[in-house]
Amino acid sequence: MRTLLLRSLFARPVTIGAPSPEDAALAEVGAALEAQARRLFGRSITIREVDAGSCNGCELEIHALSNAVYDVERFGIRFAASPRHADVLLVTGPVTKNMKVALERTYAATPNPKWVVAVGDCACGCGIFAESYATVGSVEAVLPVDLHIKGCPPRPIELLRGLLALLKSATSG
Amino acid sequence: MADDALTEILDLAKALDVLAPWPRFEVDSNAWTQIGHLLKAGDADMLALWCEPHAVHLALRAPASDACVVSLAISDGSFPSIGQFHPPAIRLERTIHDLYGIVAKGCPDRRPWLDHGAWELQAPLGTRPSAPVRDPADYAFLPVRGQGLHQVPVGPVHAGTIEPGHFRFTANGEMVARVEERLGYTHKGIDALMAGSDIDHAARIAARISGDSTVAYSFAFAHAVESALGVEAPARAQVLRGVMAELERIANHFGDIGAICNDAAFALAHAHCGIFRERVLAVCDRVFGHRLMMGCIVPGGVAADISAENAAEIVAVLDDLTPRFAEIVKLYDDTPSLQDRTCNTGIVGKELVRRWAAGGYVGRASGRDFDARRDIGYPPYAGMSVDAPVLERGDVDARVWVRIREAEASMKLLRGWLAAIPAGPLQTALPAVREPREGCAMIEAFRGDIWFWLRVADGRVERAHARDASVFQWPLLEAAIEDNIIADFPICNKSFNCSYAGHDL
């Protein structure tokens, strides 16, 4: 273990460079923030992730954001265990009817100002489960959504682009 | 002896010549009940129990023999409960009632399971769906009586980035007396979505049953369709399927081994394992065009090819990861603070694992020597020696070691295949068959065997049913946590890593 630790001390970081925020995402977020009271976050946002019925593919990629390669914390983006500590709700899944109430309550427990990011094709309303008797269809049908990150599932780098766009808009006002 | 008992029952039953590769029999309620007794005696493993509006099907397998399906026609909206003899069937019978409105007569637990009362329909797949009459909050957890007990409700929204489900802990101080699971939050009505959709669309749904096992589910779906239509994927496609399945397995094992260490507050292993997983997913993305390889396996073959350079690229990643993984394994083995958390924690007894026929690392860490790759022997594993390590202790540590050995075995398999991928086409065209045909498949996903059954006719899926390994692992998690402290629940849970989406379907 000692050699491993020593080696780690001198090893170069494995992180990749930051991607530039997507233009479309920036525009969407900018419009969403216009109407809200802007608040400076000290260049940081805290996220509460809510799985509203996904296949868990999106969760795997959201998890990857925290690994040593993407290391999302270096940009001031942190994940919190409680919605009470969150600025952003990151919601995945087609919102099953069984999860609708839990999602609404999580939103209600998140302090203002808050943003909702729909992650993945299901959450964005175009998923394969939209037709089911057991799903609501998209996050937008339950909560106001400020940013859509599409993909099935979106790659971590795409998630990062969207979140950096959100961070940029939230802190530039 | 065991085989004889089952053979005797099936000899009297009517063999239906519709299912491939395993036989299906039509039985009467008397034989159905006898099979319940057989399961109770441990003479056969229950593989799946599912329903259609007019029949209920039970897949089972006697040790060292082929699987089979027995079907019981339903006329009066009920069938004799298997769960009254064989507890693993109880949740499945509750599911059947929720989806079809068909009652398992004699089932000891009649509470709803997937239906929380929030759908606009009761029994949405049955012949007579009706309006819901229940309040979603009205659910009676099992009573626990005793002095000094308190309850801790957790979920469905959890503290981490994980899927939704509810756990009701009853504890005495820190010691857990019981945990009861309430699942169904991710129910998306997959059986209903599959019914009537064309094969390509159904394949896309199958790939999204459980995102972490997307290769295994696509594999199982494709295999079931091919069995039904009597075709085989080309040799090259079969080997590529094996490559994808093993890449999925090692990526998941790397991630989970790291996450278990993280739950024991050992972040160093987590960081390294996270990089290993990322390396595997990144190479999958470069080679197959999707990090999780979603949609890469299709009925008839595969949708993604690899070049010689691609194969060399995957081998280079394996070459790089092998010594680094060995180092982390040694670190795991040599760190007492970690061992203190994993050894003797969350023990699942051999008898329970046998009775539930739990697959994957949950079964193999508790002495159940079953691996569908070896024991079902589907291509490309047929005729290959698959190392399936079996341990006896059944604790978190045993489950970690089974995963470690499996990851190593997968890397060996991958190297073998990548050295010589047969040339040839990637897909076999599916024949147009008008009359209904049925197919089933059993595929070893990273967390255990999954079962897929379907009926196709005229290029469409008439009915389909999938059963995740988690279905028979979730109840064992309840047993594993008993007499442990609440703080050890996350590490027990992570060592199982059951799928919510795969269970709730």
Image (cartoon, rainbow, N blue to C red):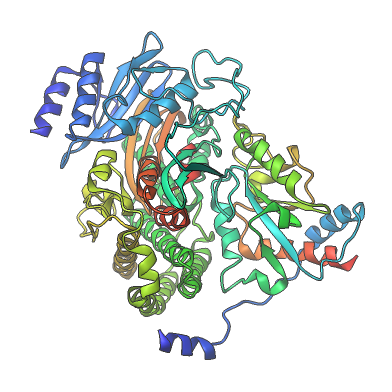
Q: Quadrant of residue B92?
A: top left
Name the one closer to the observer, B487 or B268. Answer: B487
The image shows a total of numbered marks equal to 0
Q: Is residue B264 above or below residue B446?
A: below
The residue depicted at 58 percent of the width and 50 percent of the height is B158
Tell me if B4 is positioned left or right of B166 in this view: left
**Can you say which quadrant of the picture contains the N terminus of chain B?**
top left
Residue A83 placement (x, y as % from top left): 70, 52
Q: Seen from this angle, which residue lies furthest left? A: B1
Q: Is residue B69 above or below residue B152?
A: above
Name the one closer to the observer, A71 or A29. Answer: A71
Observer able to see residue A122 = yes
Tell me if A86 is positioned left or right of B164 in this view: right
The residue depicted at 29 percent of the width and 39 percent of the height is B356
Observer able to see residue B231 = no
Name the one closer to the observer, A65 or B492. Answer: B492
Residue B487 placement (x, y as % from top left): 47, 57
Q: Is residue B73 above or below residue B478?
A: above
The residue depicted at 20 percent of the width and 35 percent of the height is B44
Residue A150 placement (x, y as % from top left): 68, 52
Name the one closer to the observer, B229 or A172. Answer: A172
Q: Seen from this angle, which residue lies furthest top? A: B76
Tell me if B411 is positioned left or right of A52 in this view: left
